[in-house]
Structure formats: structure tokens, C-alpha cells
Amino acid sequence: MSIITIPKILREKLTDEGANALVEILDKVEDRSQAHTAETVELRFEKRLTEETTRLEKKIESVRADLEKKIESTKTDIIKWMFIFWIGQFASIVGILTAILFAFFK
């Protein structure tokens, strides 16, 4: 709270009691003004915070969707390569067994 000084001429016209009453009124006005300013700033901050949070949630959801697509694509590729590997292993085993059987029965 700031200090309010009443000029001498005004103090003489209002008397000390009147000057003190005027100071009290001005202090109350200042307090109310500060409270109103704080309330306005708080409301603006909450509104801005809500907007930013909403934007952030949208960005997170977008990134999440992209990541899910990439994971799905990767799973598909892994399964495809697993089958290729299994077919290759099966062909190798059949080839080795065939070679062994031909060598054994020849």
C-alpha cells in the first residue's frame, strides 16, 4: 500500500478527521482496484492456460496417432520377415535332410 500525503491546504479545509477519512476511502479504492486487477489477470491466465492445454492435447493426440500407424507398419514388416525367415529355414532343413537321405541311401 502506498503512502498518501494530503497537501496542507486540503488538510486545512477538510480538517484532520476529514483528511484521514479521505485517505481511508482512497486506500479502500486502491485495495478494490488491486483485487479487481488480480481477478482479471487470473481469469485471463486460466483462459490462456486452458487454450494452451487444449492445443497441447491435440498435438499429443496427433503424435500418438502417427506413432500408432508407425508401430502397426513395423509390426506388419516384422511378421512378413518372420515368415520369410521361417520359409528359408524350412527350405534349408528340407534341403539338408534330402542331401543326407540321398547320401545315406546311395
Image: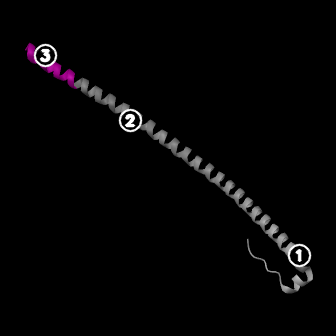
Quadrant of the image occupied by residue 14: bottom right
Q: Give the residue pinned by disc 1.
A: 17
Q: Residue at x 21, y 23 (%)?
A: 93
Find the magenta span and give its range.
92-106
Specify which label sits upstream in the sequence, 2 or 1. 1
- Label 1 is placed on what type of residue? Glu
- Residue drawn at the location 29% of the way across and 26% of the way down: 86
The residue mark sitting in front, 2 or 1, is: 1
Q: Main secondary structure of the magenta part?
A: helix
Q: Which of labels 1 and 3 is toward the front?
A: 1
Residue 97 versus residue 18 in the image, above or below = above
Marks 3 and 2 close (CB-CB < 8 Å): no
Residue 36 at x, y percent in the picture: 77, 62
* SS under mark 3: helix
| Residue 77 marker | 2
Which residue is under mark 3? 101
Residue 38, horizontal then vertical, whole percent: 72, 62
Query: Which of the image's four quarters has the C terminus?
Result: top left
Give amino acid for label 2: Asp
